[in-house]
Image (tube, rainbow, N blue to C red):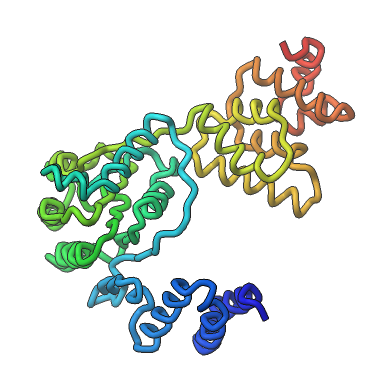
Amino acid sequence: MNAEDLIPKLVRACLDGDKRLVEEITIMLIKKIKKTNPETAKELSSALMHSNNGITSLRSLEFNSVPIDKESNYHLGIIEEPIETKAPILSQRQMYEIQKFVTERKMSEALINEGIMPPKSILFIGPPGVGKSYTAKWLSFELNLPLITIDLAASISSYLGKSGQNIKRIFDHARSFPSILFLDEIDAIAKRRDDESDTGELKRLVNVLLKEMESWPSSSVILGASNHPDLLDEALWRRFDKVVNFETPKEPEITAMIRRNLADYCEISDSLIEILVKISGGLSNDDIEKLCTGIRRRSVTERVAPADIAVEEFCKMNLKMDRKTKKRLCVLIKEISPEVTCRGISEITGIPSASVNRYLREGGT
């Protein structure tokens, strides 16, 4: 049996929670690969050893266990290993700012040797679904640092002073080894202190957060993300070395997303991609990815070509199209499927049959 043959068995054992079988298969895997991949075999052995000692296997990578809230017994955060992640599809300006941060982090030692402190904090702001969390995972991969995400539900307590203690504990944990501390939805714990509707406890929490950020080591990164930057305390903005504004994707980014999530898996003409882009204005990165995944899923289950259902799925979003786009859409559908009737095009697009008929007579110009 080859090492590759053990992988499905190992996955099934993991999903079934069969620790004994996981250990047995891992030992077999170590024996199979120790000559060809000694480093991987060593990593597997270390993970197995730590697990058998009753310690989380992440300790084999020198990651400490995330602290637990004593009252609820919930972990105050989640720690994830860096995993290979495709670069996010963002505007040129956004990618320039983020890549600049990555480059400076990778050159931390050179900067310090010149008496220059490398950036150690970055804030992502923008509406939901535009790629902030995805970019956080990519940043973890690029910098080869574990990603520690604070669980705000577990950290914020109704007990006086307890929330601040929890935040301090997770900060202490994150600074104990090189990592990225991800403060997702940071506006929940860092609201403006001049907001009279907030309790004194939340205002104290902002003070704790600001103090912890001041003493943050250069070996690690603080990454904040907010859907509501207008709620953030003014002092918090000054604590971040860089702020990146995430926006709803424009046509170049939408085109790239459709190509990555749809055209890379099936045949889609450039003209069809152009139409899909035109009717996707206002959609977020997540919306477009889910749409493309839904099209591929439906293509498999219904055994239809993705090109035949792509427009229908995108039009279900009831997005507003100008007259030129509607006309071009109707003509393109007719070109792709000459047998489809005006009524059929109307059912696909939601455009009235009379308008479809007129558009087809006029042509796509």
Residue 361 position by quadrant? top right
Residue 283: horizontal and vertical position, in percent?
52, 35
**Camera-side residue of 176 and 125:** 176
Badge count = 0
Q: Is residue 320 among the parts visible in the rendering?
A: yes
Residue 183: horizontal and vertical position, in percent?
28, 53
Q: Is residue 39 left or right of residue 276?
A: left
Above/below status of 146 relative to 188? below
Q: Is residue 22 left or right of residue 161?
A: right
**Camera-side residue of 350 and 113:** 113
Residue 250: horizontal and vertical position, in percent?
49, 28
Outermost residue, front side: 35
Residue 184: horizontal and vertical position, in percent?
32, 52
Name the residue located 21 percent from the left edge and 50 percent from the top edge: 109
Residue 52 position by quadrant? bottom left
Name the residue located 61 percent from the left edge and 28 percent from the top edge: 279
Q: Is residue 197 left or right of residue 289?
A: left
Q: Is residue 196 among the parts visible in the rendering?
A: no
Above/below status of 114 relative to 37? above
Name the residue located 23 percent from the left edge and 65 percent from the top edge: 177
Name the residue located 57 percent from the left edge and 32 percent from the top edge: 255
Image quadrant holding the N terminus, namely bottom right
Image quadrant holding the C terminus, namely top right
